[in-house]
Image (spheres, rainbow, N blue to C red):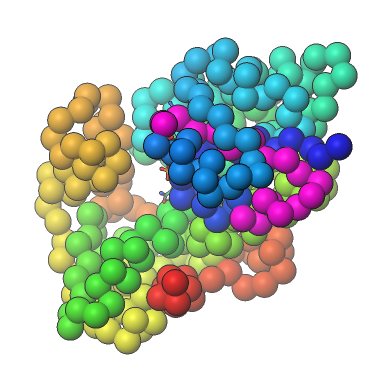
Amino acid sequence: MAELIVLTCASGKQCSHLIPLLYDEPKYKLRLVVNSDASSERLQKQYPKAEVVQANLDFPQDCARILEGATVIYYIGPPLTWKETYYGINIVDAAITESQKQGSKFAHFVFSSVLHPELTKLLNHDRKRYVEEHLTESMLPYTILQPSHFTDNAIGQLVAQKDAERPVFRAAHSVQTLFSFTSLHDYAEASAKVIQERSKHFYATYQLVSTMPLKYTEYIKSIGEAMGKEIEIQEMSFDEAVGTFSERMFGSRDGGPQFLRDAIERLVLYYNHRGLYSNPNILEWLIGRTGSSPADVARHYLKQ
Ligand SMILES: NC(=O)c1ccc[n+]([C@@H]2O[C@H](COP(=O)([O-])OP(=O)(O)OC[C@H]3O[C@@H](n4cnc5c(N)ncnc54)[C@H](OP(=O)(O)O)[C@@H]3O)[C@@H](O)[C@H]2O)c1
């Protein structure tokens, strides 16, 4: 019988690259977890062989329901919410309960966390630190994956300007800051490998980045080269950047609770002075090839 693989945030960026790598494997049955009606309808149409379930990770009973009969959970937490730690703890507790049921098939908890969860100034990193702690102490067979800033984040808005004479990048923070970038496709390939090889990766924590640290100016230049264009960079003010992030994440520039804006404000402040550094060795060992450059990722989107 096919093993049940549960993926949370199934309508999100990460899963849009991971699901296609698992969907056609006859040994797996996928349970795709979403929150909204719109995402549920979209994924049912897109992946008719998968089971699509709606859940709110805030509710322990929903977490228990999505784990029923599961062999693997690939857990992604919803972004930038002050409840992120609670969601993660709820899901780890549900996995513990599932693993202790008679005849349980539960075998692997994979947590898609973030690079450097020890950075306490970044709330969206700090909140994952407690989930990592709870998972590590749970005695479940686990693997923790730590991606950096996704290479793909800015590419959509730039590729959409491919016919413009001079595309513009509106920078939410200083473009002098350096980041190791993680390509969503590279990350999905590494994640699929961890799910497929399972026990080889038990109790491991992997930093998964595609590039060495690059200045944001180099990142934008590399995308521009793939597009055959010079991209103009315009830096936003702090308030404008927070408003733009808030609108993208929560649909409102200045409305919404301060609880939601806190993480965005800290992120913009942090990225004005410090970036996220790592090394692509672990990713390259997992996927058996060099990590994708920003230009590689841009070329991929340009072909679509
Ligand atoms: N952006 C980056 O550069 C970056 C880098 C490293 C790590 N991360 C981490 O990646 C994670 C987000 O993953 P993503 O980017 O793939 O997702 P995403 O594209 O931001 O999508 C958000 C997802 O969260 C779901 N969701 C929202 N509230 C929920 C709730 N209460 N219960 C259950 N599901 C809920 C949404 O479901 P509906 O569609 O149904 O509403 C949607 O699937 C965050 O933890 C973030 O910190 C991001």
Count the labels in the image: 0
Q: Residue at x 76, y 52 (%)?
A: 25
Q: Residue at x 54, y 71 (%)?
A: 292
**Residue 236 percent location from the top left of the image:** 14, 56
The magenta span reads 20-37
The C terminus sits in image quarter: bottom left
The N terminus sits in image quarter: top right
Q: Quadrant of residue 84?
A: top left
Q: Residue at x 40, y 75 (%)?
A: 302
Give the residue furthest to the bottom: 228
- Position above or below: 78 against 93: below
**Residue 200 percent location from the top left of the image:** 82, 48
**Residue 175 percent location from the top left of the image:** 26, 64
Does the magenta run of residues contain 56? no
**Left/right of residue 15 with respect to residue 229 in the rendered view:** right
Q: Of 275 and 16, which appears nearest the observer? A: 16
User: From this viewpoint, is residue 278 visible?
Assistant: no
**Left/right of residue 139 with respect to residue 63 in the rendered view:** right
User: From this viewpoint, is residue 51 visible?
Assistant: yes
Q: Of 278 and 148, which appears nearest the observer? A: 148
Q: Quadrant of residue 301?
A: bottom left
User: Which quadrant of the frame does ligand 1 lie within?
Assistant: top left
Q: Residue at x 24, y 80 (%)?
A: 163
**Residue 293 percent location from the top left of the image:** 49, 73
